[in-house]
């Protein structure tokens, strides 16, 4: 039972990450590969604030949110001045830079060793220690995230983002502040990634630089695209499929040594197959715009 | 100082070859092709396997051919299919990311995750300014340089080159002038993969290689491609220049600080209206 609760909690944490990625890559049409960097930053800041400074989980979450959103806003001013294709490269560079910074020996992050012994979240005398309580907390926060995501998808911001995705020059000529709107989407992505990091770290009780690898960013993007870019339920479906897939492979009896590689191959093939035959994802409706190309 | 400057320039030549291959795919095929990272890292593995049975030069040729063949297969199967479906560049980008993940995992399954070395631990050579230069790595760099010059000559003075340039400037116009894009894109993919494979093997001679080497190499060449923008010379100069800066920086501070500084330099370059950069980026 505890195992199922664990899998459900991980699915929801990844669904929050995929929801964040959906703002930039799905609604805005800019493929971002730096979700994992913000995920790791959220995790590390929560770990340091709760473990070393003995702050409460909620205070740590708020401090992490403010710091990372400020960083995301500052970075996005430069990142979104680059053309779309270069934005992807820059987001990947950002991810790599954060990874190198976290993996370097010494310092607060303690390099590849990571940080251990992170205390569980506490709300007064209520400690979130059992798998049931952890899942309940994750579910409550996911419900809040869904509420925000639905509110944003009905707000003018979503319509402007869709206009930018379809025709940036047209949106700009219609008087929309393209970079400012994209920055908002980027800040939302950073905020949700930090929330996911802050949820994950007390749950796992340790954090290491593997949270910020390129593979992790690709996984988050795959979840978003496989579920359906720009859709409301797509990220949850994508996360459910891709998180449960390795668990199913475990039951099939594939040797542990090759299970990770087979999982990567399946992720990769899922991405390629999705792009070839179903670019709108499993339950999505939007397929990235089509361009005239020679046969 | 001569030692690290030489080291920066020589490794810059390797990265220049890799960056120009990526640039060629971006400009002509209009795909930001992440699978390129996986394709080029196949070469050191194949070269190492072939070195046991054939002379080194034939092994290098075989490795380059293997990378080119893989690039041709990917172009003919995945990217051509996507183009036939009028796929958006974002779709091609995501597909290339998927291919990259698959290639990397396959390399890891076949050869293992450990870093391997190409050539012996202390290959014969000589020392300049405290820097040991092996004959093998110098030969590899010479090949890289020749390949870069060859590509430049191909682009500026041959019919295939002018067609490739036409495709990179205006795809539709090139099509309407009777240029057969399908075959040219195959040629372009093969050239890019061969150039990148030479660069990857040259880097591997010095630093070794592992399945994730392709990803590390892409991280190293992205700033050069962003700063170099849309010109061959721009990409070539920024590859070598950034590598010299990287090597110089690593003498005084840890690698992650250098990468952080370089990343912020790239961001500042995007923000500041530096005229020469803008000209390079938009010409």
Image: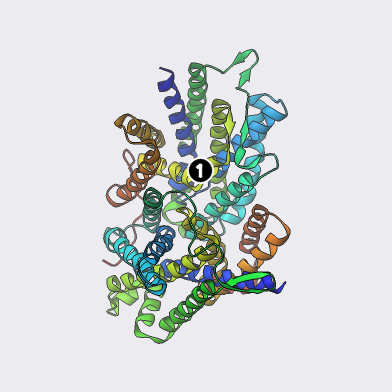
The residue positioned 41% from the left and 82% from the top of the image is: B154
Position of B164 with respect to A177 (left or right) is left
| Residue B52, horizontal then vertical, whole percent | 38, 64
| Residue A255, horizontal then vertical, whole percent | 35, 36
Identify the image quadrant of the N terminus of chain A: top left
**B7 or A167, nearer to the observer:** B7
| Residue B5, horizontal then vertical, whole percent | 67, 72
A123 in relation to A95, above or below: above
The residue positioned 57% from the left and 18% from the top of the image is: A128
How crowded pointer 1 is (Cα within 10 Å; few <14, some 14-19, many 20+) is rated as some
Evaluate whether residue B229 shows in this view: no
The residue positioned 57% from the left and 48% from the top of the image is: A183
Parent chain of label 1: A
The residue labelled by disc 1 is A157
Q: Secondary structure at mark 1?
A: helix
| Residue B80, horizontal then vertical, whole percent | 29, 62
């Amino acid at each position: 039972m505890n195992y199922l609760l664990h899998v459900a909690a991980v699915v929801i944490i990844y669904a929050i990450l995929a929801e964040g990625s959906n703002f930039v890559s799905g609604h805005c049409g800019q493929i971002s590969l730096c979700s994992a960097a913000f995920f790791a930053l959220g995790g590390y800041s929560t770990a340091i604030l709760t473990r070393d400074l003995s702050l409460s989980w909620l205070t740590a979450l708020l401090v992490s949110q403010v710091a990372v959103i400020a960083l995301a806003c500052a970075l996005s001013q430069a990142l979104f001045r680059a053309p779309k294709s270069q934005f992807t490269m820059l987001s990947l560079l950002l991810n790599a830079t954060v990874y190198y910074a976290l993996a370097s020996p010494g310092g607060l992050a303690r390099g590849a060793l990571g940080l251990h012994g992170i205390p569980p979240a506490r709300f007064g005398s209520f400690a979130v220690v059992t798998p049931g309580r952890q899942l309940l907390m994750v579910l409550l926060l996911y419900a809040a995230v869904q509420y925000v995501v639905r509110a944003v998808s009905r707000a003018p911001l979503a319509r402007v983002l869709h206009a930018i995705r379809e025709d940036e020059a047209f949106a700009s000529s219609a008087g929309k502040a393209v970079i400012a709107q994209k920055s908002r989407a980027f800040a939302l992505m950073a905020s949700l990634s930090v929330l996911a990091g802050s949820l994950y770290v007390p749950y796992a009780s340790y954090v290491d630089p593997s949270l910020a690898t390129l593979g992790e960013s690709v996984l988050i993007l795959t979840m978003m695209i496989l579920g359906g870019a720009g859709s409301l339920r797509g990220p949850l479906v994508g996360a459910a499929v891709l998180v449960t897939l390795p668990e199913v492979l475990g039951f099939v009896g594939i040797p542990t040594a090759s299970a990770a590689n087979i999982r990567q191959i399946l992720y990769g093939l899922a991405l390629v197959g999705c792009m070839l035959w179903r670019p709108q994802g499993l339950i999505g409706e939007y397929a990235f715009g089509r361009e005239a190309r020679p046969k | 100082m001569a030692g690290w400057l030489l080291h920066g320039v020589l490794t810059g030549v390797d990265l220049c070859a890799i960056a120009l291959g990526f640039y060629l795919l971006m400009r002509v095929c209009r795909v930001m092709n992440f699978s390129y990272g996986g394709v080029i890292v196949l070469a050191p593995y194949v070269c190492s396997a072939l070195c046991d049975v054939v002379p080194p030069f034939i092994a290098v040729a075989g490795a380059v051919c293997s990378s080119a063949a893989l690039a041709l297969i990917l172009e003919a199967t995945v990217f051509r299919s996507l183009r036939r479906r009028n796929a958006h560049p974002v779709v091609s980008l995501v597909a290339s990311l998927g291919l990259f993940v698959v290639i990397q995992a396959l390399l890891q399954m076949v050869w293992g995750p450990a870093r391997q070395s190409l050539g012996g631990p202390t290959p014969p050579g000589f020392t300049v300014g405290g820097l040991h230069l092996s004959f093998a790595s110098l030969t590899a760099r010479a090949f890289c340089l020749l390949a870069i010059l060859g590509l430049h000559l191909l682009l500026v003075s041959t019919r295939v080159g002018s067609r490739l340039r036409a495709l990179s400037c205006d795809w539709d116009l090139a099509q309407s002038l009777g240029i057969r894009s399908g075959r040219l894109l195959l040629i372009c993919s093969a050239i890019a993969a061969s150039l990148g494979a030479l660069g990857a093997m040259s880097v591997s001679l010095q630093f070794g290689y592992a399945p994730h080497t392709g990803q590390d190499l892409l991280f190293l060449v992205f700033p050069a491609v962003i700063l170099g923008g849309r010109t061959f010379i721009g990409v070539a100069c920024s590859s070598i220049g950034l590598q010299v800066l990287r090597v110089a920086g690593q003498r005084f501070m840890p690698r992650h600080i250098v990468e952080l500084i370089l990343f912020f330099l790239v961001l500042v370059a995007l923000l500041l209206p530096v005229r020469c950069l803008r000209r390079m980026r938009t010409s």
